[in-house]
Image (spheres, rainbow, N blue to C red):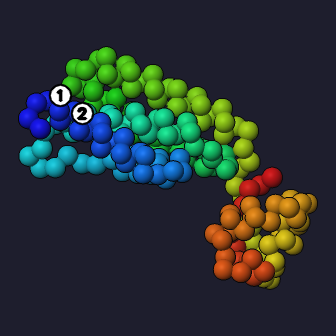
Amino acid sequence: MSTPAELVAAMLALVAGVAETAADPSDRVRLLMALAEAPMPAGGNAALAAVGRRAALSALARAATACQPRSYDEAESLRTDVCELLATEEIVAADAGEDAVATALRAVRGAVDRDLRRRGANLSPLRPVEVKALMPSLVLAQRLYGDAGREPEITRMAGDPPNPIFMPERFTALAR
């Protein structure tokens, strides 16, 4: 790889490969965030580092729209994290005089922000759950939601305890 075009193609292939390794959109977001936040190595090429970050941010924006947050809090956290990364890169591009890139990043940030706000608005917020004694997940689901059928959900929210007959006394669950 000696030409700039080959380096850019390799960088894009790397980002695509990382994105494809995760079947779950949440895992994809986590991996791409790490790429987008990766610091430039000492003596590294700033332009190539910018290409890598921007490719990761582009893939991250797509992954964020594919995510299905389980709660309002999760959607809001994802929105904040992704939009902060996009805003940071937008400033870097603007400071470098790359106005078209900064404008494109602003548009992507706005689209991600609107999408996650819209989807998050329809989700239940999280709330702390505290019980005085160990209870089975079926009983907790019935008490919290009036629906024992939500037992798998409450078990997952409690961190998948080894035995759902003995749920933890404190955990976070959906408010409704």
Q: Amino acid at mark 2?
A: Ala
The residue lying at 63 percent from left, 44 percent from top is 68
Give the quadrant of the N terminus: top left
Q: Which residue is mark 1?
A: 5
The residue lying at 81 percent from left, 52 percent from top is 176
Mark 2 secondary-structure assignment: helix
Q: Amino acid at mark 1?
A: Ala
Callout 1–callout 2 Cβ contact below 8 Å: yes
Using the image, determine if residue 98 lies above or below residue 54. above
Residue 72 percent across, percent down from the top left: 67, 46
> Spatial distance from mark 1 to mark 2, Cα to Cα?
6 Å
Q: Is residue 142 left or right of residue 110?
A: right
Mark 1 secondary-structure assignment: helix
Q: Is residue 111 left or right of residue 51?
A: right
Residue 90 percent across, percent down from the top left: 34, 29
Nearer-the-camera pick, 69 or 77: 69
Q: Residues within 10 Å of mark 2 (few under 14, many from 20)?
A: few
Residue 169 percent across, percent down from the top left: 73, 77
